Image: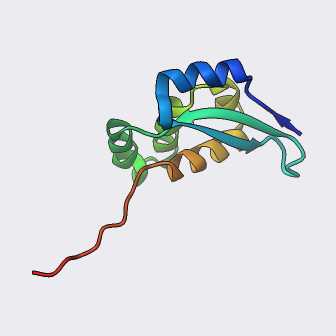
Amino acid sequence: MIRKVSEEVKASFKKEHGDKLKSLILPMDDNGAEELEVLAIVPPRNVVGQYLKFLNQDPKKAQEILVKACLVTNKEEVLADDGLFYAAASLIGELIPIRQGKFGTV
């Protein structure tokens, strides 16, 4: 069973953030029987910079930077639960817009 974000809340944040808004489904228990839908935004460049700055020195702080800056719903609930926190941090990390370049010929 998924605890979903209401359509009104989604519409409000969609109007504010546009295509940068993403829905994340987080497991609330180890069995995955209950899930929580939260909304997050794609991390902007300054947030990614702060995240990368702390990634090797203090991974927990790096993850907190991502979650606190990008989560727009249920932030307190996610921060209070380790399982939700790590699931959210992992998914938000995957939202970092990294494109694969290629070399051309000279």
Q: Quadrant of the C terminus?
A: bottom left
Q: Is residue 28 left or right of residue 75?
A: right
Answer with the quarter of the image where residue 46 lies.
Answer: top left
Picture residue at 52% right of the left edge, 44% below the top: 60
Picture residue at 59% right of the left edge, 50% below the top: 90
**Residue nearer the viewer, 8 or 87:** 8
> Looking at the picture, how far across and down is residue 18, in whole percent?
49, 30
**Residue nearer the viewer, 3 or 84:** 3
Given the current orientation, which residue lies at the most extreme left position? 106
> Looking at the picture, how far across and down is residue 24, in whole percent?
66, 41
Q: Is residue 13 above or below residue 70?
A: above
How many marks overall?
Answer: 0
> Looking at the picture, how far across and down is residue 89, in whole percent?
57, 44
Answer with the quarter of the image where residue 43 lies.
Answer: top left
Given the current orientation, which residue lies at the most extreme bottom position? 105
Q: Quadrant of the N terminus?
A: top right
Picture residue at 37% right of the left edge, 60% below the top: 99
Task: Look at the image and name its color scheme.
Answer: rainbow
Q: Is residue 88 left or right of residue 69?
A: right
Q: Is residue 99 left or right of residue 8?
A: left
Answer with the quarter of the image where residue 12 lies.
Answer: top right
> Looking at the picture, how far across and down is residue 17, in whole percent?
48, 27
Picture residue at 70% right of the left edge, 40% below the top: 84
